[in-house]
Image (cartoon, helix red, strand yellow):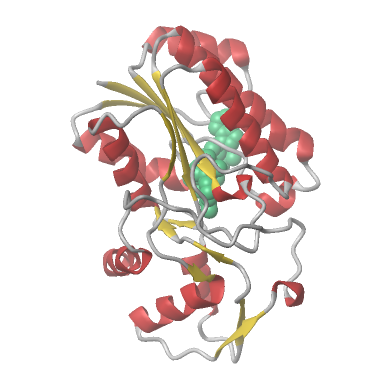
Amino acid sequence: MKIMVTGANGMLGQDLCPMLENIGAFVIPTDISNLDITDKNAVDDFVKNVHPDIIVHCAAYTNVDKAENDKENAFKINGEGAENIAIAASENNALMIYISTDYVFDGTKTTPYLPNDKTNPINVYGASKLEGEEAVKKYCQKYYIARTSWLYGHNGKNFVETMILLADKPELKVVDDQVGCPTWTVELCRGIIKLISEQKPYGTYHVCGGGNTSWYGFAKEIFNQMELNVNLKPCTTDEFPRDAKRPKYSIMENNSICPDWKESLKEYIKLRG
Ligand SMILES: NC(=O)c1ccc[n+]([C@@H]2O[C@H](COP(=O)([O-])OP(=O)(O)OC[C@H]3O[C@@H](n4cnc5c(N)ncnc54)[C@H](OP(=O)(O)O)[C@@H]3O)[C@@H](O)[C@H]2O)c1
């Protein structure tokens, strides 16, 4: 099985490539250095040449706040880039796996989001990722859209490492009025592998940690598990303004595809040593 991975040098890609190799796949890693996904001709030639069975599309414009004032680039990479990959996947009969986000929702629901719930992004990043989802649905017959959220991993800037860096502050305020599902990159990779190996029906899945919490609750659990004594205080979103609006309620139903987020956090912390 030949699997092409875009965004292979990113936080998710760096965990995904070796995990795919571990299940016996021949992995073709790509990133901006050898394939710019916004270059349609380059994408067409590359995919035709390597003729993969599967493309896992992890490459993206991921700076949520920066995207607010850099709309054109965000849409070029997350919308047009995804469309280029989707067309090439379809023309070469490859299964397309598109990594998407909880930010396609507006956060006004009060019960966990289901894969077919109405999307209505409230920031540029979410809107650009939704455009990518729509391209996948338009061009691919064989696809999985894997929506994930609050991602952290060993190879990228993320909330867990930021909290650990800030642990010695005299007081640490963390937002308590946004709730969601923290997801470890390795757990997302296991979920992607499950979709492939169990040959789940094509469509949209929520591949995020089970259970839910607020950012404050997430921080509290990190410090508990690491046995760090931190002066942690809850605060509101209004006290911590950002360029991009975030959905208040980002909980997605994951149908047990990933374990409880606290269990995954334990494994992550154990591995980071
Ligand atoms: N991080 C989260 O909390 C989160 C939450 C939900 C969903 N997701 C989704 O999960 C996926 C993986 O995220 P991640 O955290 O691993 O992101 P990441 O670390 O930012 O990795 C994205 C990779 O894509 C590359 N890239 C950017 N523009 C490109 C282009 N034009 N052509 C080719 N490659 C390009 C980046 O290269 P440069 O670094 O050189 O730009 C980077 O290596 C993304 O689709 C993201 O939207 C992430």
Question: x and y percent of residue 239 in the render?
Answer: 75, 77
Query: Does residue 36 appear in the picture of this structure?
Result: no
Q: Residue at x 81, y 46 (%)?
A: 69
| Screen quadrant of the C terminus | bottom left
Q: Residue at x 49, y 18 (%)?
A: 140
Indicate left or right for 215 with 242 as reference: left
On screen, 156 above or below 117?
Answer: below
| Screen quadrant of the N terminus | top left
Question: x and y percent of residue 52 in the render?
Answer: 35, 16
Q: Residue at x 27, y 35 (%)?
A: 20
Question: x and y percent of residue 92 in the render?
Answer: 42, 9
Q: Quadrant of residue 26?
A: top left
On screen, 14 above or below 111?
Answer: above
Question: x and y percent of residue 155 in the render?
Answer: 42, 53
Q: Residue furthest right?
A: 69
Ligand 1's quadrant: top right
Q: Quadrant of residue 201?
A: top left
Indicate left or right for 213 with 238 as reference: left
Indicate left or right for 238 with 140 as reference: right
Q: In front here: 127 or 170? A: 127
Q: In front here: 221 or 156? A: 221
Query: Does residue 147 appear in the picture of this structure?
Result: yes
